[in-house]
Amino acid sequence: MRRALLAAALAVSVVGPGLAAAQHSAAAASAPGAAPAPRRALPQDFADIDLTPTFASLALPGAGQHLLRQDRKWAYLALEVAGWGFFVERRRAGGHYRDRYRDFAWDNGRIQGSTRVDGDFEYFERLAHWTRSGAFDRDVVAPGVQPELDGTTFNGSVWARAVGLFLGGNGNVPETDPAYQSALAYYGSEAYASGLLWDWSGAPAAQAQYADLLETSDSRFRQATTVLGVVIANHVLSAADAYLSSRGKGAAPRVRLLPDVVRGQGWIVAFSIPVRR
């Protein structure tokens, strides 16, 4: 009992003065005429910085550096002009090869109908990977749609997938069965109908040439997308450089060409701006 009272007394003697000091400090701060407590200095505000060079560079790389009288404006401007020029050239080349592979497929692989109808890019990719589309309706005389059964054709693979999804792998289901109708609806939405059928049988060299044209077109469009990313990065880098220079902390940025270690092939462009502290 004595030990408990002694511990309580010590706690009061220790906590009490601290609490009293805190209350005294709060009272002193709120007392009339008392000097306000010093505040920590805030970093430089945006209002103290001229953001005109920053926004100018964001709109046109190099413009902010021109306002700041920096010679590296020419590097930003040159990259901007070269980037857009390369982007336009790659897009034009991609469109040129796209027209070529579409015409080539129509002349050499597709089953021509009365009117030419071109599908989307996925359709043309399948022309490069599948030798035959197969028929959409293998018996046009019979009522309804009779799906393609040859699994080595594209349409036949679609029907095989539909049978597995909706019929449990059993294709001997009455056509009146709701499950069969669901499989047929799936087939109708995924298989290619008349007007989009193809057959490269006996012409493997022609299909290989078509695949090369398709890849060439796709690579040109991918390169255009990559260059567009570089152009956008150039805007952001020029704006960041102008902002740091306006604060007196900017230094000449560095641009490096590095191997792409993630994909294991190709190169990446690395931008960096040293910041003085």
Image (cartoon, rainbow, N blue to C red):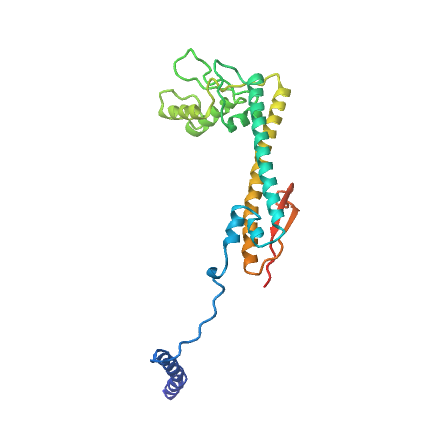
Quarter of the figure with residue 91: top right
Q: Is residue 269 left or right of residue 114?
A: right
Q: Is residue 247 above or below residue 189?
A: below
Q: Is residue 114 above or below residue 97?
A: above
Q: Position of residue 148 (x, y in %)?
A: 48, 19
Count of numbered marks? 0
Which residue is pictured at 44% across the width and 72% down the height?
Answer: 39
Q: Position of residue 64 (x, y in %)?
A: 55, 51
Q: Is residue 191 above or below residue 269?
A: above
Q: Is residue 107 left or right of residue 42?
A: right
Q: Which quadrant would the C terminus be assigned to in this image?
A: bottom right
The residue nearer to you, when weighing 117 against 175, is 117
Q: Is residue 131 above or below residue 88?
A: above
Q: Residue furthest top?
A: 141
Q: Which quadrant would the N terminus be assigned to in this image?
A: bottom left
Quarter of the figure with residue 106: top right
Q: Residue furthest left?
A: 32
Which residue is pictured at 65% across the width and 49% down the height?
Answer: 256
The residue nearer to you, when weighing 101 against 10, is 101
